[in-house]
Amino acid sequence: MKLAAPATVWKKLAADDLFLQWKKQHTKGFLSHFFCSLTADFAVKSNWEVGFYDPATEKITVFAWLDNGSFAVKAADDVFKKPDATVEELKMSTMTAEADKPFDTFTESVGSFFPGEVLGDGFLIVQNWQGATIWNFTFITKTLKFVNVKIDAGDGEVMSHEVIDLVMKDK
């Protein structure tokens, strides 16, 4: 499956009746992220899901882009974030890097950032993080670690990379 550019999906969603009806009832709601699942070999496993945060309810509503080009809406759900974190608005105007560039940057750098790690499935989130629009790639490794690479959506350059060990070891 080829991943569509977020701008293409956003344009279709912004004109969709389902979204327009939701927006009438959630006037303060704003675009917060794009999400898709990825396989261990970096292939796209799911179409984009587009999230909107409503500060009035502190919930996220997700619109899933279906294979036929229409959308389905998921029930509003709690936000997955650290207690002191803020959900930032994702502005489409800040996304100048084409979809292929962040993927190329990730695939070219993942081996050198995480040598010896065997990756399982993962996901990609396009979001605003600390004031910057990023492509946030996260994969779980076979040794129960998360590997994460954040790529700037404006210039396509790597902003950060880290390994998070999911199993705490006593010394």
Image (tube, helix red, strand yellow):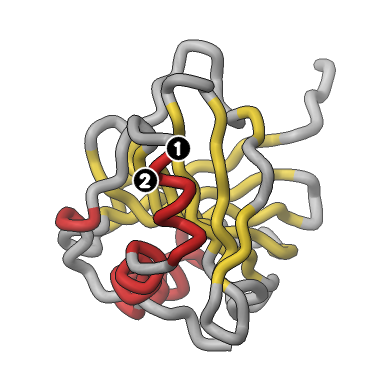
In the rendered view, does 40 fall on the left or right side of 161?
Answer: right
Q: Nearer the viewer, residue 25 or 82?
A: 25
* Residue bearing the label numbered 1: 25
What kind of residue is marked 2? Leu
In the rendered view, does 71 fall on the left or right side of 113?
Answer: right
Which label belongs to residue 31?
Answer: 2
Residue at the spot 33% in from the left edge and 76% down from the top edge: 8
Q: Nearer the viewer, residue 131 or 88?
A: 88
| SS type, badge 2 | strand
Does residue 55 appear in this view?
yes
In the rendered view, does 159 fall on the left or right side of 55?
Answer: left
The image quarter containing residue 130 is top left
Q: Position of residue 76 (x, y in %)?
A: 63, 37
What kind of residue is marked 1? Gln
Q: Position of residue 97 (x, y in %)?
A: 22, 69
Residue at the spot 40% in from the left edge and 66% down from the top edge: 13
Which label belongs to residue 15?
Answer: none
